[in-house]
Amino acid sequence: MRSSRLNRFELKRLGRRWHWPRWRLHLPRWHWQSLRLVWQRLRWQNLRFVWQHLHWQNLRLVWQRLLLYWQHLGWQQWLIIAGVLAVVMVAVLPVVTGRTTPRWYRLRAAELAIRTAQESNADSWAPDALRSAQRVLRLAQVEHRHQETRFLLLRDFARADMLLQDAQAKGHRALEMSLGKRRDARSTSREAMTRASEAIGRSVAFGQAMHLGRSDRSLLQQAKIGLAESRLLFERGEYTLATRRAYVASGHAEMVSNRAVRVAARYSDADLVRQWRSWIDATIAASRRSGQPAIIVNKEKHTLTLYSGGRPVRSYAAELGYNSAGNKYRSGDGATPEGRYRVTTKKPVGQSTYHMALLLDYPNSEDRHRFEQARRAGRIGRNVSPGGLIEIHGEGGRGKDWTKGCVALTNGEMADLFTRVAVGTPVTIVGGDGNGGTFTHLVDLHRNGANNFGLD
């Protein structure tokens, strides 16, 4: 082993070569006074000078001197060095592992996830999930800020990172729930509007085929307005409100259809159709036996057919009372009576308000009997009469049922019919003949749940 004198000499020579200041590099013992002396002698100019003159020969000499110095260390010095190194490693380990690094990227990602959920109206579609995500984000922000204010080596962003990951996941979950519920609500709203459109279509079809009361017309108008509002709300993305408006509109339209079906259902009644059919057969048979003309009015098909000798001669398009779906019970109900009548008077031009007319013998005995039964049942008031002056007259061709109970033809067709019949000609008015018609078709559609009248 080389002597300590030689070692000191070499260190002194090395110091002169680098032009170091005259202070002892070699520490014979490890004590705090020597460390303080080294710290006091360190100057920026000296460090810069050393850096400027560093090259591999100098580094090699320094390394050799360090090895030589370490050979003279005792176990106490080595123990202190090991302790210092351990403390340094423990202090540096969090920095190396990233525990002290702020989670800026994770923070921005969590905020972006929740902001995206808010922009997709998650506060309306998934409010609970969004509030949970926002609560976790606030906790994460507080924890992240708390760690930023701490000393570098004491920072630990692990909990903040965990909270931010949870907030980001909850934000994505709120977004997915919002989009899913929004998609479901959109589909439900579309289906509700479709059902409302179908229900309104059926009600409109009933209204075109028969007379609707004032309340039913009001309900139908409200249903149309409700459907229009529902479509506007749907376009604005307010699917829940659109669905509610569509349900209300559908309910109003269904009320109108149900009441109309109750009136029109008589056209599908087997007993009533059988009775009407027997009247038709009896009228045709009488015409065949007598060879005289006979008239059959089919209310459901809106036709007036002239028979002669039991064979159809001509058919006319007929317009009826504005309440054509029902049977006539009293004066002013707007219904065309059903039964077997005869022409009692022929009114040429000038004697009728409606060009020409054939007056019928309504009410006959059967009509009066039915009227009395309805009065005893309480369906008709005491001060009401069965009505009268039911005619087949002109001024028709308006394309709708408009009379107060009469049968209207165009003036030309009325003139043709007027010349073919005489007083006493049988006139049979029936609701239908059992071979289908407007009311039968509408009732079947309503009962089968089908719809061919959807509105655009």
Image (spheres, rainbow, N blue to C red):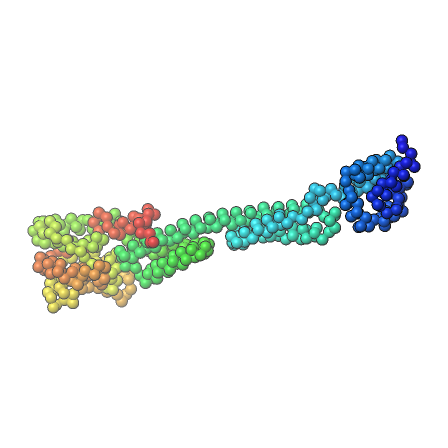
Residue 419 visible in the current orientation: yes
Left/right placement of residue 156 relative to residue 288 reads right
In this view, the residue in front, 58 or 83, is 58
Residue at (39, 53) in percent of width and height: 193
Return the x and y of residue 216 as percentages of the image width and height. 33, 60
Tell me the quadrant of the picture where the N terminus can be found.
top right
In which quarter of the view is residue 417 placed?
bottom left
In this view, the residue in front, 206 or 364, is 206
Left/right placement of residue 235 relative to residue 332 reads right
Return the x and y of residue 160 as percentages of the image width and height. 66, 48
In this view, the residue in front, 347 or 147, is 147
Residue 48 drawn above or below residue 401: above
Residue at (25, 59) in percent of width and height: 323
Return the x and y of residue 185 as percentages of the image width and height. 46, 50
Return the x and y of residue 276 as percentages of the image width and height. 20, 51
Left/right placement of residue 142 relative to residue 353 reads right
Tell me the quadrant of the picture where the C terminus can be found.
bottom left
